[in-house]
Amino acid sequence: MSYDERHGQVLDTAAAVVGTEGADALTLARVAEQAGVTKPIVYGHFETRAGW
């Protein structure tokens, strides 16, 4: 998957987490789990929640 495709996947997954579980559930670890990728992949796109 290209960087841009993965970036979109991570954003879509983050939006889904917020939509179903609320903003308090939004963590980089949770997004990684839901997207089926490792935490370092998510951290490569967004270092912090503020970076979303």
Image (cartoon, rainbow, N blue to C red):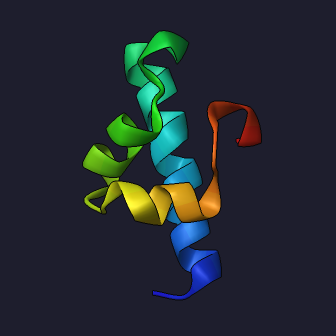
To which quarter of the image does residue 36 belong?
A: bottom left
Up/down of 1 relative to 36, above or below: below
Is residue 26 visible to us here? yes
- Residue drawn at x 54%, y 15% is 23
Q: Residue at x 54, y 36 (%)?
A: 15
Question: In the image, 49: left or right of 25?
Answer: right
Q: Is residue 42 above or below residue 19?
A: below
Residue 40 placement (x, y as % from top left):
42, 61
Q: Point out residue 24 in the picture as x, y percentages from the top left corner.
A: 49, 11
> Does residue 1 appear left or right of residue 50 in this picture?
left
Instruction: Give whichever of 2, 44 is nearer the camera.
Output: 44
Picture quarter with the N terminus: bottom left
**Residue that extends furthest to the right in the rendered view of this protein:** 51
Q: Nearer the viewer, residue 13 or 33?
A: 33
Q: Residue at x 34, y 36 (%)?
A: 30
- Image height check: is 21 above or below 37? above
Residue at 37% x, 54% y is: 39
